[in-house]
Amino acid sequence: MDKRIKEIFKFYGEKAQKQQLIQELAELIVGLTKNDLENIHEEIADVEIMLEQLKLFKNIDIKKIEEYREFKLNRQMKRIESLKSKEF
C-alpha cells in the first residue's frame, strides 16, 4: 500500500474521509452521466484512493471482498447463460 494513503487518512481523519469518499462517488456519477471520459478517469482514481483508505482503516477483510466479488461475478454469468439459452 502506498504510504501516502495512510498519511492522508491520518491527517484528515475518518469522518472527513468518509465524507470525501461520498463526494468522490457523486463526482464519478456526474462524470458517467455526462459521458466525460477524462473526468471519469480522474474520478475513478479519486474513488480508488478513497476505497484504499477505507479498507486500511476500517480493517476490511480483503479476502471477504474477493469472495463476494467472485460470488457476484459467477452469479451474473449464470444469469447471462440463462438469458442466452432463452433466446433460442
Image: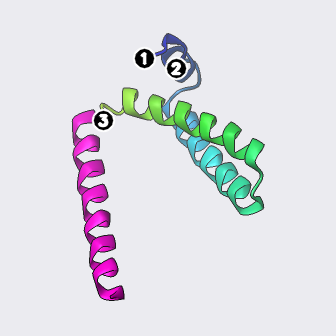
Residue 5 position within the rendered picture, expressed as x and y whole percent measured from the top left: 52, 20
For this orientation, the residue located farthest to the top is 3
| Disc 1 residue type (three-letter) | Met
Q: Are marks 1 and 2 in contact (CB under 8 Å)?
A: yes
First in sequence, mark 1 or 3: give its number: 1
Q: CA distance from mark 1 to mark 2?
A: 8 Å
**Residue occupying image coordinates x 27% and y 41%:** 66
62 in the magenta segment: yes
Quadrant position of residue 42: top right
Q: Residues within 10 Å of mark 2 (few under 14, many from 20)?
A: some
Q: Nearer the viewer, mark 1 or mark 3?
A: 1
**Residue occupying image coordinates x 38% and y 33%:** 55
Q: Are marks 3 and 2 in contact (CB under 8 Å)?
A: no
Quadrant position of residue 87: bottom left
Whether residue 61 is visible: no
Q: Which residue is mark 1?
A: 1
Magenta region, residue range: 60-88
Please identify the quadrant where the N terminus is shown: top left
Element on which disc 3 rests: loop
Q: Is residue 61 left or right of residue 3?
A: left
Whether residue 58 is visible: yes
Residue 22 position within the rendered picture, expressed as x and y whole percent measured from the top left: 58, 48
Q: Which residue is mark 2?
A: 5
Q: Is residue 14 left or right of residue 26?
A: left
Element on which disc 2 rests: helix
Residue 52 position within the rendered picture, expressed as x and y whole percent measured from the top left: 46, 30
Q: Which residue is mark 3?
A: 60
Element on which disc 1 rests: loop
